[in-house]
Image (cartoon, rainbow, N blue to C red):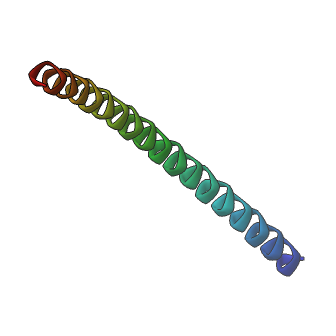
């Protein structure tokens, strides 16, 4: 009987460990998703600024011609 209980307890412990690891990796994935979204927004902002500067430069060049 002790052997069966020991096996059941081991299975329960392994399941709990797997659930804990799953929750950890889900949280890690969510965290990195947030980082990626933030960086994407930063890149979009930088690109918009660069495009604005390019238009100003092109406009200035046209005025000089």
Between residues 5 and 46, which one lies in front from this camera angle? 46
Between residues 38 and 65, which one lies in front from this camera angle? 65
Residue 11: percent from the left, percent from the top?
A: 78, 69
Q: Residue at x 88, y 76 (%)?
A: 4
Residue 54 is left or right of residue 64, and the answer is right
- Hey, which residue is sitting farthest left in the picture? 64
Numbered marks: total: 0
Is residue 23 positioned above or below 18 on the image? above
Residue 52 is left or right of residue 24, and the answer is left
Position of the N terminus, as image quadrant, is bottom right
Residue 20: percent from the left, percent from the top?
A: 61, 55
Residue 57: percent from the left, percent from the top?
A: 16, 27
Q: Report which quarter residue 52 is drawn in.
A: top left
Q: Residue at x 59, y 59 (%)?
A: 21
Between residues 4 and 32, which one lies in front from this camera angle? 32
Q: Residue at x 45, y 37 (%)?
A: 37
Is residue 16 positioned above or below 30 on the image? below
- Hey, which residue is sitting farthest front in the picture? 65
Between residues 50 and 32, which one lies in front from this camera angle? 50
Position of the C terminus, as image quadrant, is top left
Residue 55: percent from the left, percent from the top?
A: 25, 24
Is residue 40 positioned above or below 17 on the image? above
Residue 13 is left or right of residue 50, and the answer is right
Residue 6 is left or right of residue 59, and the answer is right
Q: Residue at x 59, y 49 (%)?
A: 26
């Amino acid at each position: 009987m002790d052997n069966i209980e020991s096996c059941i307890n081991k299975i329960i412990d392994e399941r709990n460990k797997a659930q804990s690891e799953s929750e950890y990796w889900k949280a890690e994935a969510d965290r990195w998703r947030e980082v990626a979204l933030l960086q994407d927004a930063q890149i979009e902002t930088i690109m918009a600024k660069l495009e604005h500067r390019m238009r100003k430069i092109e406009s200035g060049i046209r005025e000089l011609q």
